[in-house]
Image (spheres, helix red, strand yellow):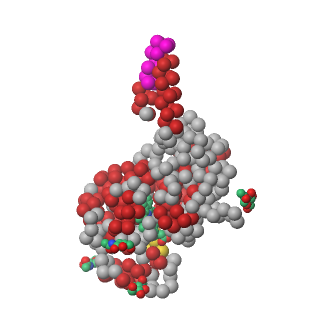
């Protein structure tokens, strides 16, 4: 679609007026078809808000340089937004006395942060181009910029998502996979959203950054056998059998603030932190993919970037559906 428009653009330098008109009309029709069929485009804000992307990037860079973990939060927000009824910024809506959002869902409560950074970006964008850039697009771009800020792959983010007027606590609880799932459960959770087992492995590579709470890995330390014994022993003081639920430990103990493939090497060494992490390398069907990413960083980076784009394309609201929120925390 974009290439077509570019090819057509080249005709505009010619002098044959009727052709120009025909071509322009054709482009317009293609454009309308594109919008109607809900296609996203990486040039969506090129004329309506030319500084949108640079504004988001500087805000993300400044937040991540203050606290590297902010990059992890911003990446995780995209996952927890898109897996719950699509990439519509539903995860950002605050609870009110007459509205229940998704922030108190099990995977989000006491865990997801970064909303203040999204708010900062939103208010900057409302100043330079009011009511133009959606919160859902801010999430997708901030996730990409976070990955890049921590050393991960760059990719173009298709844009044009709009924001929901609803949220679903129950969908957040049921659609975001739990760390207690086995490999079959993980594959099913991702397949329900159109992802392959290979996508599951690539996307789990997000756990190359960020931290987890003791409550999410305690059982693995005390009850599992596919964990390196000295690794488990070294973790027990920070995650006792009872108490310390909110104590934090890096998901990738080797390089917790660098986006690299060390997460996969940890899995091979039985140093996955979450039960769900180690399930990807535990004698099952995804072992080979984990090994492939250990030996080929470039393959991981390329597959990860593609899978992130695919995630960002989950049921976006486009055209006249939804709205452009002026405050990401509440419906207009
Ligand atoms: C494969 C299934 C997945 C499961 C079961 C899972 C589960 C979890 C859990 C339990 C935590 C720790 C939360 C806490 O203790 O507060 C976590 C952290 C994180 N997850 Fe996942 N996750 C999965 C996939 C993903 C995907 C696909 C992404 C991004 C594309 C992602 C990004 C992150 C990040 C960046 C963190 C660290 C956040 C922080 O520092 O607080 N995860 N995940
Ligand atoms: C919900 O409550 C807020 C105040 O918290 C009020 O402003 C708003 O009109 C209410 N919305 C509906 C749909 O009742
Ligand atoms: C995976 O978990 C499901 C649900 O808890 C269970 O029914 C199934 O037997 C498990 N599969 C394996 C291979 O352990
Ligand atoms: C380990 O498993 C046993 C038996 O299923 C259970 O009673 C215990 O609570 C588990 N321990 C942890 C730390 O999860
Ligand atoms: C666990 O890791 C240590 C290195 O920290 C290593 O010496 C040991 O051999 C590992 N244990 C197993 C069973 O692989």
81 or 237, which lies in front? Answer: 81
Can the viewer see residue 75 in this picture? no
156 or 20, which lies in front? Answer: 20
Region rendered in magenta: 8-19
Q: Residue at x 64, y 49 (%)?
A: 325
Q: Is residue 197 left or right of residue 25?
A: left
Establish if 318 lies above or below 307.
above
Q: Residue at x 66, y 49 (%)?
A: 326
Verify whether residue 17 appears in magenta: yes
Q: Position of residue 14 (x, y in %)?
A: 45, 15
Verify whether residue 15 appears in magenta: yes
Q: Residue at x 51, y 23 (%)?
A: 25
Q: Is residue 313 left or right of residue 275?
A: right
Q: Is residue 310 left or right of residue 324?
A: left
Ligand 2 image position (quadrant): bottom right
Q: Position of residue 208 (x, y in %)?
A: 39, 63
Q: Position of residue 137 (x, y in %)?
A: 53, 48
Can the viewer see residue 47 in this picture? yes
149 or 275, which lies in front? Answer: 275
Quadrant in the picture for residue 266: bottom left
Q: Position of residue 33 (x, y in %)?
A: 49, 34
127 or 5, which lies in front? Answer: 5
Establish if 66 lies above or below 243.
above
Figure disc tally:
0
Q: Residue at x 41, y 58 (%)?
A: 192
Q: Quadrant of the N terminus?
A: top left
Quadrant in the picture for residue 127: top right
């Amino acid at each position: 679609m974009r290439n077509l428009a570019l090819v057509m653009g080249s005709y505009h330098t010619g002098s044959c007026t009727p052709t120009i008109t025909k071509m322009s009309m054709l482009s317009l029709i293609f454009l309308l078809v594109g919008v109607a069929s809900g296609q996203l485009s990486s040039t969506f804000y090129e004329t309506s808000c030319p500084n949108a992307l640079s504004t988001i990037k500087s805000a993300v860079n400044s937040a991540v340089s203050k606290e590297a973990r902010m990059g992890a939060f911003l990446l995780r927000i995209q996952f927890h937004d898109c897996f719950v009824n699509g990439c519509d910024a539903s995860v950002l809506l605050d609870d009110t006395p007459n509205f229940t959002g998704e922030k108190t869902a099990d995977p989000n409560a006491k865990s997801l942060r970064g909303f203040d950074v999204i708010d900062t970006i939103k208010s900057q964008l409302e100043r330079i181009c009011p009511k133009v850039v959606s919160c859902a697009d801010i999430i997708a771009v901030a996730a990409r910029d976070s990955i890049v800020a921590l050393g991960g792959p760059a990719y173009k983010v298709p844009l044009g998502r709009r924001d929901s007027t609803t949220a679903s606590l129950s969908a957040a609880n049921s659609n975001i996979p739990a760390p207690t799932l086995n490999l079959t459960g993980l594959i099913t959770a991702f397949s329900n959203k159109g992802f392959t087992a290979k996508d599951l492995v690539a996307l789990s590579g997000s756990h190359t950054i960020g931290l987890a709470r003791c409550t999410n890995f305690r059982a693995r330390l005390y009850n599992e056998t596919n964990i390196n014994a000295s690794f488990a022993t070294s973790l027990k003081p920070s995650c006792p059998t009872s108490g310390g639920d909110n104590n934090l430990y890096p998901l990738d103990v080797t390089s917790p603030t660098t986006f690299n493939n060390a997460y996969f090497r940890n899995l091979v060494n039985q140093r996955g932190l979450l039960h769900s992490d180690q399930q990807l390398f535990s004698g099952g069907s995804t072992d080979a993919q984990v090994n492939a990413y250990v030996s080929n960083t470039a393959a991981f980076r390329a597959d990860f970037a593609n899978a992130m784009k695919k995630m960002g394309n989950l049921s976006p609201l486009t055209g006249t559906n939804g709205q452009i929120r002026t405050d990401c925390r509440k419906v207009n």
